[in-house]
Each structure stands twice: as structure tokens, then as C-alpha cells.
Amino acid sequence: MQTIILAGGKGKRVFPLAANSPKPMFKLLGKPLIHHVIDTLKEAGLKDYVVVVGHRGEQIKDYLKDGSKLGVNIKYTVQKESLGMADALKTAEDLAEDNFFVVNADDMFEASLIKQMHRQFKEGKAQIVLSSKPVKETWKFGIIRVEDEQVTDFVEKPAKGKEPSNLAVVGVYVLTKQIFDYYKKIPVSDHQYEDAILQFIKDRNVVKAVSYGGFFAGYKYPWDLFAINKYLMDNKIKQQTIEEGVQIADRATVEGNVWIAKGAKVFDGAYIKGPCYIGENSVVGGNSLVRNYSSLGKGCVVGFATEIKHSLIGDDCWFHMNYIGDSIISDNCLFGAGTITANYRFDENNIKVQIGENRVDSGTNKLGAIIGDSCKTGINACLEPGVKIGPQSMVGPNVDLQNDLEPAKIILVDKNSYIKKDNKITISSESKQKLMKKLMKTE
């Protein structure tokens, strides 16, 4: 069966990570998200795709081409404006087969879901097949009602207490080409896609759903990448993998499920504790630490005395004497010595992030910085929890960045705000001498 992959959105909610590239081109374990999605579809037996591209779509086409290198067949359509899923799907109407799968290019799921839905389509004689799983926060999802194995209602983000059930629709669909006729009847909106399916249900067509208990994560906000990365590492790095040309010093330590790609170099005193991924031709320097589901792109340099913990790093990023915790850093960034990403509030509450006009709860109390392409920081800069830095921006030396920084900006400490006065404090060496005696005292 054919699959239509939707990859045309602008990714406003994940800014700044998709400012200069399509959302599905964010790399984890050395490959863009869309490549991982295709791997899953291929595992389930699907090899014929129509990819709908939009924002910066040429990058997707340049990477995937006709799909032959991946063992699949790919055609393309273009969504000129980001007007929702239905509008994106309409661009593929002339290429669509009578029935087809629809998936988002940056949603992660198991191949078993595709197989389960395909089986329901063939055996249940359904025209549309939805996938669902129980949720507690029903107001955040599209919710369906199922009676006698058929879907009888579909409500997008119902008000609390008004939900038809607790079954949320997972973003994988089997559709019929008849759905295009419904798009023509329903006004363009953010929920035109769901409205068309609801009308299809009301017209007493056969719509069925499968109950799915496996992994599913959509990339809607920057921090969603952490769940996707964990799933990929748990399933693709099940043992230690050291590719050709890797140099690991005798006094370096590589522990656990770590994948080190070709040409990488690990210096004396470095400690890599898996699960982790180290990209091609990257360098992990002396006395540095990389741990806890960190993924480094190609050509990175983790310099002396740097710690990278539970962070996602793009290509060609350089660090030196830094702490990078629970952060997402895009390509070609450089951190000055002493720069740290703060990732934990004093009050231990969840970290909120500015998304458009709203402060959105990230759902975690551990979240560092979210940084776009080609950014730099000066020495001893501090990036507070949840701050975002736009592409081509710089954070100057000694700056404590507490609010988001727009693209192509530089923020510096104002020297005029310094206070200089006479020093009346005498520095005594006595306390140091007493402490030294304690330190030198033998047990």
C-alpha cells in the first residue's frame, strides 16, 4: 500500500530548531527524523511514498532524492502555504491510490502499528482505519467513540467533561481517496482534516480503529525530541558499536551501549557512558564526560573538562570547559570556556518555555537551553533553564541570559553598570593556612 508522508509544516512551535531547515530534518543518531520514519515504514513492508514538502523542502528532496539509496520509491508534491494537514494532503490527490497510509514525517512509532492497521483494513473491510490509545488528558487530543468495532464520533480537543471517550487518535491513518471529495465541501481550517473524517463517519461509511499500546511520540515542541531520542537509542543501540577508523585512547573509558561513528577520536581521560551516540569525525577531549542519552552530530569537538548530559547536539559544534545539560543545540554552534546551561529551577517546578504568545509547561523540571544554528557564547556565559536562542545570535561574556534571544542578535553586559569603589576588606592568609594544615594532616 502507498504512504503519503506529510513534511510541509513550518514548525513554528519548535522555533528555533526549524528556522533554517524543515522540522523532519532534525538529526538524531546521525540521521534526520524523516529517515527514521522511512526505516519504520520499510520495516512494516511499505516502500512506495509520496512526500509532501513545504518550508525549506528542497533540503528533504536533496537528502532523500528518489529513495533508491534507501531501497524505496519516492515522489514529491509541494504545499505552497502551511494551511493544515488537509491542504497538504490535497496536493497529493493526483498521485494517491484508492487507499493509502498517511503519516507525519516527524512522528515516531513502531512498525507493528502499521502492520496492525493494514490487517484491520484488509480483514475489517474498512474504508478508513484510525489508530487510538487511552489517555487521561483528553482535551489535548482528537478523541473518538467506538461502538461495535466502528468509529461513531470524532471530536478534536473536546472540552473537559464533553469527551466521547478516552481514546485519543494517534497520528497514523489509512484513508480512502473518497476523502478528497469531503475536503472540497469543508472550509479550510486547522481542523479541516478531522472535520472531513467526522463527516465521513456521519455519512455512515465504514471507519474502524485499532487499539495501539506501543510507542508513539510526535515532534510538536522542542522537548519532544528527548522522548524520540530515547526510543531510538533503546531500540538501535543495544550493544557497543565502534565503527572503522575510530581512535580510543588507552586511558579513555567507554561504558555501556555506546555507538561511535567512523573517524571519531576519544582522548585520554574521556568518559562516555551509554546510551550515547558520537557522530562521524567527532572528538571527545581529555577529562570530558558524555552521558545519559546524549547524541552528538558529526564533526563536533567536546573539549577539555566539558560535560554533556542528556543533550542533543547538531553537526560541527565545539565546546570547551562547559556544562551542557538537558539541552538541544543546532548545527555549527560554539561555546566559550565556562559557558553553562542551567537546567533546574531553585523551586524544582516544571520549566516553562515561551511558545509564541504563551508560556508552555514542558512537563519536566530538567530542561536546559534550546539553540538555533550558528550561535556563539562568550566565556562564563550562563543560559537559564528553558531559554531559546535564535539562529546566528551571540551571548557575550559573563551574560546571564534569562529571556529568549531573537535571531541575528548579540547580547552583552553593559560596562557602564559596573560599580567601582575603594576596597576596605583585608584579605588574611591565616584562614588559608589553617585549612592547608587540615588538608596536609595525615590520618
Image (cartoon, grey):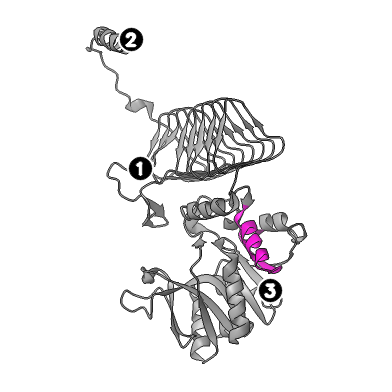
Which numbered disc covers residue 2? 3
Cα–Cα span, label 1 and label 3: 45 Å
Q: Amino acid at mark 3?
A: Gln
Q: Position of residue 21 (x, y in %)?
A: 60, 53
- Give the magenta-colored segment's residue range: 32-57
Cα–Cα span, label 1 and label 2: 36 Å
Q: Is residue 19 above or below residue 88?
A: above
Q: How many other residues sit within 10 Å of disc 2, few (<14), some (14-19) or many (≥20)?
A: few
Which residue was labeled with disc 1? 344
Residue 167 showing in the rendered view: yes
Which residue sits furthest front?
443
| Pointer 1 or 3: first along the chain | 3
Q: Is residue 70 above or below residue 47?
A: above
Q: Position of residue 108 (x, y in %)?
A: 55, 61
Q: Secondary structure at mark 3?
A: strand
| Pointer 2 or 3: first along the chain | 3
Which residue sits furthest left?
424
